[in-house]
Amino acid sequence: MIYYYAQCAEAFKRDLIGRRQVKKYSVLFVLFFSLHSFLWTNVAAESPKRIIALAPSMTEALFALGLGDNIVGVSSFSDYPAEAKKKPMVGSMSNPSIEAVISLKPDIVVMALDGNRKEFEEKLRSLKIRTYVFRAKRISELPQGIRDLGVALGQRERAESLAEHIGAGIRAISVKGDATKKQKILFIVWPEPLIVAGPGSIADDAIAILGGQNIADETRIAYPKFSIEEIIRRSPDIIFIGKGTGMMEKVSHGLLDRLNKVPAVKNKRVYYVGDYLYRLGPRTVTGIEELARYMEAR
Amino acid sequence: MKARMTIIIVVAVMIFCFSVVAGPHVINPFALDETSKEILFYIRVPRSIVAVLMGMALGASGAVLQGMLRNPLADPYILGISSGAALAAAVGILGGFSFLGTFTVPALSFAGAIITGSIVGIMAWKKGGLWPERLLLAGVGLSFLFSALLMLLMSLSSDDGLRKAMLWIFGDLSMSDWSKIPYGCFFVATGILVATMRAKALNALILGDEFAHSLGFAPHRERVLLFVSVALMTAASVSLGGMIGFIGLLVPHIVRFFLGSDSRLLIPAAALSGGALLCIADLISRTVMPPMELPAGVITAIIGAPYFLYLLRGKNVLSR
């Protein structure tokens, strides 16, 4: 029992550090809630049988924790791993169907702070449905996020080793990244209108880890609408284009034509990359490795 | 009046020139290096031209519609043309179509606009003519239908696709390049020309069909011509850069405060002022928070609406 309380105190501390900006009453409420769920999972000491994942990244994380068979519902675009596509869909990440969620009788609904709406979580809680919110939004927070998720879902060991694996992967790349000199990089999320990865986005984190310089790093939001003029002025050495929904090469034609004087385009260093960096989860490291390969290619 | 019209022309030209050289970095057109040259000729000039074309189309068609429908609340978007264009564009963006390369979305939206315009025209047709009330109601009805379909499409789509479509719908000038300008120019110029040539008839229509008839105009024929010109201009404007609010509705009113409501002056003046306003708005939208850009449609309303409200005090709306 004492052990559990020590653990709770730990959770308290972590929570306090992480949520300083949130208003006081909600802090108290969340603390109480996390304390409660913490006790519950530890006392129960086994994984929930029916889990709903409300974000593609969470679906991936649950599969990686070996909980794939316990997933009874996923959000749309949960397309990895392949088995995820066979799970019943409960709606989109930003607007899931509450009825679909309830009718699947979940033991717990796993959501991501980055993507799911807070109101939906509140609504589920008011209906006495257990929720878990994945707090990590940045790559640096990912290993701890995975650990916390594992604890909440009774998969402490697997989460520990996954987190260790992710952490080691990031560290390994970080070291390699030092070899490349500071290259100017732009990560395009969508060419028309031009949306790029700014500070706070996973791609920006990845570029920083790799020792590159994101030319969009002084914008204030994660996915800003960027100015073409500024791309020309800042002349990136490498341009990454996220694949997103596919057809990206055709859609980016017009933009790249207009950027033909920029070093990245002139030297054919425009690369189409996968969707790994749109989802903070088990495959994020793969995404960083992909960028690293292209940044080292020369 | 002549003097005021000259002032408007001069100011509009000055604004255009200013918007080309000003921005997050001022470009001196007399001392160009390689980068600034490229930015000037391939980014800023086409962008400002597109802004001018769109603003002109919206201002002129607003002026025509308010007279033709005898309704101070009429604007180019009330006919549903823009929602048809937006729906077609959203289908293109969310469906990832690219059969015409970068022309896909503009071409789709132009087609959407023209088809919607024709449907509105057909619905408004009765007893051998277009009726203002029917035009208005058919337009409003269709635009509700298309907006609903658009919402449906968006709620079924992925989150990032939705963001892209939203940005397009709220007006995006950043992708303007030379390739679409000739087409835009052609349709906008045709529209403004037709509207200005029929301005006398429009003046008569404002006074009522019988009055117009007794002055020797055929009300139905004039309305068809004016409607076609408005449909062309609106379609061109929406497919050039999405929907920009405010200009079509309020610029004609602002111009009326200065020049009165003689359509012969009002149409060209509203076109010029609309073009100039959108040019300024675009300049602001790319200058305030570099390297980010804000949607120009937001800026037009933020700077235009307070000015309009200021002018509104103690004025007669649609004063004759």
Image: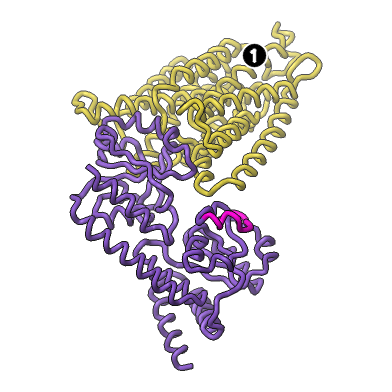
The chain in yellow? B
- Residue type (three-letter) at the residue carrying disc 1: Leu
Q: Is residue B137 magenta?
A: no
| Residue drawn at the location 60% of the way across and 21% of the way down | B230
Residue extending furthest toward the top: B216
Tag 1 subunit: B
* Circle 1 residue: B225
- Image height of B96 relative to B117, above or below: below
Residue A110: horizontal and vertical position, in percent?
54, 67
Residue A47 image-quadrant placement: bottom right
The residue nearer to you, when weighing B81 against A49, is: A49
| Segment tinted magenta in the rendering | A82-94
Q: Which of B146 and B158 lies nearest the eye of the viewer? A: B158
Q: Is residue B124 above or below residue A138?
A: above
Q: Quadrant of residue B150?
A: top right
Residue B182 visible to an observer of this rendering: yes
- Above or below, A27 against A256 in this view is below
Residue B92 placement: quadrant: top right
Q: Judging from the image, what is the letter of the chain drawn in purple?
A: A
Residue B193 lies, in percent from the top left, at 53, 12
Give residue A231's position: percent from left, percent from top: 30, 38
Residue drawn at x 45%, y 26% is B275
Residues packed near mark 1 inside 10 Å, few (<14), some (14 to 19) or many (20 plus): some
Helix, strand or loop for the magenta stretch, by majority: loop
B31 or A203: nearer the eye?
Answer: A203
